[in-house]
Every structure is written in structure tokens, then in C-alpha cells.
Image: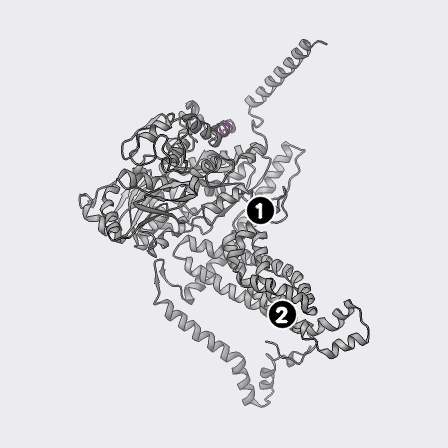
Amino acid sequence: MTNQQTGRRSFIKKTTLAIASAMVFSSGSAYALGYPEKEDLKFGFIKLTDMAPLAIAYEKRFFEDEGLYVQLEAQANWKVLLDRVIDGQLDGAHMLAGQPIAATIGYGTKANVITPISMDLNGNAITVSNKTWAAMKPNVEMENGKPKHPISASILKPVVESYKNAGKAFKMGMVFPVSTHNYELRYWLAAGGLKPGYYAPHKGDTAGTLNADVLLSVTPPPQMPSTMEAGTIEGYCVGEPWNQQAVFKGIGVPVISDNSIQTNNPEKVFGLREDFYEQYPNTTIRIVKAMIRAAKWLDEKNNKNRPEAVKILSKSSYVGADYKVIANSMTGTFEYEKGDKRSEPDFNVFFRYNATYPYYSDAIWYMTQMRRWGQISEYKPDTWYQDMAKKVYRPDIYKKAVAALIEDGVMKKSDFDTAVFTTDGYRGVQNDFMDGIPYDGSKPNAYIDSLKIGLKGKEKL
Amino acid sequence: MNPLKWSLVEPFYKLMIGEDRKSQLNNIIKMIGLPIAGLVVFLFIWQGAASHIHTSLGQFPGPIQTYEQFISLQEEAEASAIKEEKFYERQAERNAQRVEKDPSYEPTIRDYTGPPTFFEQIGRSLVTVMSGFILASIIAIPIGIIIGLSANAYAAVNPLIQIFKPVSPLAWLPLVTMVVSAVYVTDDPAFDKAFLNSMFTVLLCCLWPTIINTAAGVATVTQDLKNVSQVLRLNWWTHVRKIVLPCSIPMMFTGLRISLGIAWMVLIAAEMLAQNPGLGKFVWDEFQNGSSNSLGRIMVAVIMIGIVGFILDRGMLVLQKAVSWDKSVTLR
């Protein structure tokens, strides 16, 4: 038999197989996706309302529908959570968008962590202590007897200067060096003309306080209110319910929500090790399927399910804060000063606006901020940013999960934003930041150079 | 076994048959009345103090709020039991469905995935503490005997004991965590890493009192007994078994009791940081929750930790009484 003949035979064989399997799929009698390779899973989370997709996928049994037996476990802080994912004690976790990226590029810890799904948009706010608010308030523009929002950090500037003149440092808290909150707080401060300080990892300086007007330090989210109450920090940027908690405790005043810093900014992601996906691809796709369903459940019918979600989140094994504290932000309102309750329907977005899609441009934005503040200490070409984003953000897995959900008939193609099927992973030019600087994910260096405060071009500290 | 001889029953019995009523009443008051009076006074002071402490999470919980939280924890445990039952039902159904479609599948029953209840957390803490404690005793008692028998060995080991004895569990934990992660690499782990982390931390902290007290006990063996042993030409092993161990048992148990007390205290801290399910994690999670019930629940845990610690100590005492040769010594 000649090689050609063998080739032809196997070609015929393959074609018949393909046709046969296509017939099986179209009849809908078999799953396109195989059974999960690993059924017992343990996921970590931090006590924040944006872990909701995990809680809902568990409580509404979306995980069980995929044949997965998932255990959810609250973690002490973001560092412990990341370490436990890397050393395999956890199979995956609710993560800060910056964590898989930083781990992959080797800032802090070096490990290949990927993210196949984004968990939500927005959900954070910046809160200042009563004392700071009292000093800021006289300069805040009023509208109908209430402060006009969003409030710029330029109003905080005189307060920080008065601290400087008195020889004291103005301190604020965020939750992790590569957290969304760190970058949001820095963005807000810099947009108001305050320098939040630089990192210089090549010199071993990872405190992030070089040349700083405002000293930022790390505090785990649930400890934020008590740390501010103790007077260690004057304000913080954290996810919910820890801003509303400050209002309820009467110890602080939120001044801006992150949705006002950047409209619909990407927030938490689901992170897992790359080798976990390689070893258990079906399991991974099934996890993503369950989480997409949970996200849809959270947002569907105009947030109709949110009160039920709040009830679930207030269980002590999840977020555990009081119902009324969690309900404030989750059901579309946000209380700034006590009694100043405003409608914020998009304070937490889980599914709308294509929230679950892992966009490369979102990953690149986080890297531009890491470069801006020195965590990436040297100039990198645009292609480096793009390659790294592709290594971490995995829309390929996400798309497989979407296809499987449609195949199962659990969701319809029309349930998804058309962008899911057409996007190249870049959102295009985004003009939704409070300071009006446009961001184009395909040109990270140009964007870095367009920001007023921060490292530019080939600058190195 | 004569119940009428039990110290708790005896005075009531004697009172009933009318024997020396006055001193029986006195005995009863001492035995039952005084402890109750102490408790009642404590509850009043607690209630009074609690009502004056205002935290940002509301008033500090008094005895009543704490009791309410205990009841609510019980209710949660009951609700969880029902959920667990349903979980297994659903699982059986799902397995049956899959076997129908895919006959080669061998279903395994997965454990309930819900969060552990308060009472399960107590159980897990006990398992962790006992594993750490037993392992520590297995290591510490032989070391104690050896350094007790040989003054040279003692001189060599003593500095190490003195240096490591005061180290806080919080300092051990990061080291233990790193070492366990590096050394314990298996695809099918029999134990949770978090469990090992907290167990080894407990072990490292509760080795020392047992070593020191065992060594001290061994050193108290009188010269007379040593002479007897020599005259009888007992070999080393028999000497240890027949002479040294009986003499040093009381001291050894003193050490073991201190160790167990330390183990229980250390465990709570280790669980908080190692994220190992148990009472420590319960306290930490509740602190993080910051709900209006949190302080009450932490208080329930505090009392529970105390009660369990007390029971553990009493258990050791019973054991000590059972194995000590000299029953005339009062132990308390």
C-alpha cells in the first residue's frame, strides 16, 4: 500500500467519523462536552459581595448540574488565597484581576495562573474617615443640599497638604499591591493631582511609597473598617460591603464609587492554574458554564433575583454581613453620607454589558497601571503586553463554555451580547475614565505616555 | 461500684436517711451551691459590663445574646443536616442517570460540600489537636526519658529546649506552611495541607513541657531504686520499664497536661491563620463578617473553647489517676 492510499483511507475514515459525530451532536442526544475529569473541587473566596457568582452557582446547584461537587471556603486575605491556588490546596478562586496577571509576569509570586471568565464589573468605592470628610466637605460642590458626585481627589488635596505641613503622613488603605483597588485609588488620586507613590521592585522596594503624597498600605478587605476606626488609615478603597459597613458603623463616608472613576470597569476574575486546565479541560469548561449561568441569574429580569442573592450572601459562611448592609449596593442603591442614599443600578454588574467575557484589553489596562506605578520596572514593547494578556486571559475556554451552554439548551444565543461571538478580545478605544483620557488596549505604550502622573516611555526609577 | 459512695450522691443519700443533717447540708452547699454562686456572680458582672461596652457592631454581647446565638447556631446545624440529606439524594439520582447513559462509569459518593456547622468545627478542632498532641507525646516522652537518664544528653539538648520553648505558634506557622507545601507533594493527598499545617504547628509548640517534665520526673528516681536495679542487674530496657517509668509517671503527666493545654490554645491561632476548618477559623470568619451577630457568635466560640479545654484537662486527670501507682496523692 502506498502512502497516498493510506492517506486517502484515513481521510475517508476521518470524514465518516466527522459526519457521524456531527449527526450525533445535531440530534442533541449527546453532549459535545465530555464528563468532568475531576469532580471534587475546592474554591476560595474573600468575603465580598462580588463573590456572588460562586455562591449562586453553588446554591442554585449550577455546579451540580455540571456534575461538579464544589466546596467554597472563605480565605483570610488575598495573599493566602493566591498561594493556596498556586500550591494546589484550592482548585480555583475568586481573584483580583491583577493577581493572575502579576503571577504570570512574575511580580510578587511566579506561577502560571489563567482566567477564563471575568466575575463582575464595578463594585468598589473609596471611603474616607469622618475626620477627613469634615475637612473635605467645605470645598465640595453642593447640589440641592447634597454633595455633587463624583467628588474629585483635588478636594482631598488641601487636606493632604495640611497633613504634610504638620509633618504627618496621610495614609490610605487598599487590599493588595496588584489589586484593582490599588490602581483605582491611584487613578483617582492622580486624576486629582496627588501622587500615590511608586514601586521599584528592581531595587527591592515593594512598598509603593516612593515620592508619595499619600501613603498606601495593604489591609485585607473585611478588616478595612476596623483599621480606619483604629486611626491607622484615613481612608480606603475596597469592595462591598465594606464601604456601606463604614456608613452603618458611622465611621466614614464613601466619596466615589469605582463606576464613576471608570464606567463599567472590570473587577474580579475567576483564577486557576494553567496546568489545572491542561489536566482537566472538561472540568474547567464546566466550571465556567456554571458561573456564566450564575452571573445571568444575578442580573436577569432587571435584578429581580438580587434580594434572594443578598439573603444567600448574608449567610455567615459567605459574606456574613447584615442583610441591610449588603442589600444597599446589591439592589441598586448606594448610601454615601448617612441618609444620602442614591440610585446606582450598576453598582454591581455580573452579566450585563458582556461582563463575563475576559477581554485582553482589560488585562492590558492592568499591566499599563503596573507599568505606570513601577511594578513593571522597565519599558516593554506593545507586543509584550499583548502576549502576556493572551497567556493569562483565556476567551477560548470561555467561548467553549458558551457554546456548550447553547448546545445544552440552557441558554440561548440571544442571551449573550453579540460581542461574545464577534470580538477579537479588544474593546476598542474606551473613553470612559473620569479624567477623559481615552484608552486603546492595542496601544498600551501610547496610553501610558498619555497619563499625566506616572512613569512614561523608558523611564526607570 | 456503689453509687451511694459517690461524692456527688453521698450527702443527698445521707440527708435522706437523716444522718447528721447539718454537715450534709454544709457539704451540699460547698459542692453545688458555691460553684453556682460563682457562676451567677460572673454572669451578673458580664451582663453589667457588656451593657457598658458599645462597639461599632453594636453592644458587646451579654449572656442572653450569647445564648441566643448558641440556639441559632444549633438551628443552623439542623438546617444543614436536612440539606446534607437532600444533597446525597440528588447525588444518588445523578449517579444513576449517568450510569444509565455511560455504563462504564463507577459512581463514587462525594462528601457533602456545604460549609461545616459549628459543631462539626468543634469536632475537627478536636481531631487536629489530638493528632498534634499524640504525635508530640510520641516524640517527647522518649526524648524526655533519654535526657533524664543521661546528664550529658540533658546538657546537650537543654539549650535547644530553652530556645524553642518560648517560640510563638504564629512564628512557627509560616515555616511549617512553606515546608509542608514543599515536602508534601502527592496527587491524592490523604490529609489536607491546612490540617497538616495546623497539626505540625501544634506539635512544635506542645513538645517542650512534656520533654522537660518527663526529664525532671526521670531525674527524681531515688538512688535507692537505682541501686536495687543495679543489684538485680536489670538490663537497660527493664530498668526503664520497671523503675524509671513508674517513678516518673506523675511528672510526665503533669507535662502532658500542660502540653495539651498549650496545644488547645495554639490550635485556635493556627487554625485562624492556616485556614484549617475548626473553631479558630470559625472565630476568624465571624470577625471578618462584621455582622450584628458576630460578637455573640465569637462569644459562643470562646465559651465553647473554654469548656472543651476544661474537659480535655479533666480527661487527662482521669487518665493520670488511672495510671499512677500512688493513689494517695491528691491530684487536681
**Count of numbered circles on the image:** 2
Q: Which residue is mark 1?
A: B181
Q: Nearer the viewer, residue A380 or A30?
A: A380
Name the amino acid type tagged 2: Asn
What residue is drawn where x is 61% and y is 87%? B17
The secondary element bearing badge 1 is classed as helix
- Which chain does the residue under circle 1 lie in? B
Residue A400 part of the magenta-drawn span = yes
Task: Confirm whether residue A263 shows in the render.
Answer: yes
**In the rendered structure, the residue with mark 2 lies on which chain?**
B
**Left or right: A434 in relation to B86:** left
Indicate the amino acid at tag 1. Answer: Ser
Please, what secondary structure does the residue beneath circle 2 have?
A: helix
> Toward the viewer: A408 or A285?
A285
Q: Count residues near mark 2 (Cα–Cα under 10 Å), then give few for <14, some for 14-19, many for 20+.
A: many
Labels 2 and 1 within one chain:
yes
How dense is the environment of label 1, judged by Cα within 10 Å: few (below 14), some, or many (20 and up)?
Answer: some
Label disc, if present, on residue B213 of the rendered structure: 2
Q: Quadrant of the image for the N terminus of chain B?
A: bottom right
Residue at 56% x, 36% y: name it: A276
Q: Which stretch is magenta?
A: A397-406
The answer, for residue B322, to whether it is visible in the render is no
Residue B97 magenta-highlighted: no
Q: In which quadrant of the rendered image does the C terminus of chain B lie?
A: bottom right
> Secondary structure of the magenta portion, mostly?
helix
A399 to A139, vertically: above or below: above
Which of the pair B301/B31 is nearer the observer? B301
Q: Quadrant of residue B187?
A: top right
